[in-house]
Image (spheres, rainbow, N blue to C red):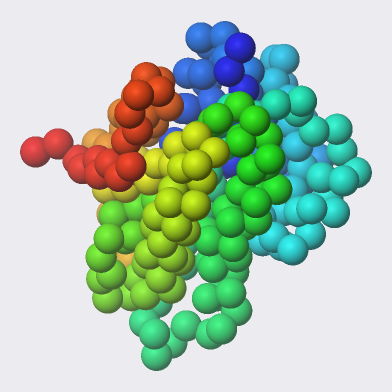
Amino acid sequence: MTVHLITGAGSGIGAALTRRLHERGDEVVLLARDAGRARELAARHPGAMTLVGDLTQPGRLSWAFSKQQLPERVDTLVHVAGIVDLGRVADLPSGIWEQQLAVNLIAPAELTRLFLPMLRVSRGQVLFVNSGAGLRANPEWGAYAASKHGLKALADALRAEEAEHGVRVTSVFPGRTATPMQERVHQQEGAEYDPARFIDPESVATTIITALDLPRDAQITDLSVRPGV
């Protein structure tokens, strides 16, 4: 049975993906930021395994995992969790930059490093849910886009490094998706939020599952998903 380790399973794209994989009988290991959140996820997905680790403190993940029981194997590592805070470069303090880089870039790098031995054994897959901001940077999106451009670089380097071990690496670049994060972005932009205008998280989950289920003779390296006309 395939074992998926997923971050960001509590809402949006991560929640849709986790539900779909769990319903079809795959095993899911869900990373939660604290014990309370882990209990919520376990109750929502009976039989799921949970791990606790704070992505805002990537340097402490190794220590946190050393105190917990880890899964015996991992076939796919799916990075969905992310945060966004908008602002002009002239206005954003360093703390906002540091937090977004920690959660959106450094934590995925550290999680990948920690679980690569398992992924090499299973000849598994790492999938990064990036963003359209990982391909271009618009005004007031500098810090977030920098973290997502870095995430693309991480994926590209990892793909080249791990090819010899049979580990596939995919980046998915969704456009604006109807998630709680998108609602927060609209609040920061001072704009009215209409989820019907944006991609349904289920559609992005379908894209991710397509990449994960692709036969082993091929891999999807980069995939952009945009709202329909």
Q: Nearer the viewer, residue 60 or 154?
A: 154
Residue 41 in sight from this viewpoint: no
Q: Is residue 193 left or right of residue 61?
A: left
Q: Is residue 78 left or right of residue 203?
A: right
Is 74 drawn above or below residue 52 in the view shown?
Answer: above
Is 90 drawn above or below residue 121 in the view shown?
Answer: below
Residue 105 in sight from this viewpoint: yes
Instruction: Spot the residue most to the bottom.
Output: 90
Residue 77 rendering spot, x and y as whole percentages: 56, 37
Which residue does the image show at 49% across and 52% down from the upper left? 161
Which residue does the image show at 9% across and 38% down from the upper left? 229
Residue 205 sits in quarter: top left
Quarter occupied by the N terminus: top right
Which residue does the image show at 30% across and 45% down from the upper left? 222
Residue 166 rendering spot, x and y as whole percentages: 50, 34
Q: Nearer the viewer, residue 190 or 113?
A: 113
Which residue does the image show at 35% across and 33% down from the upper left? 219
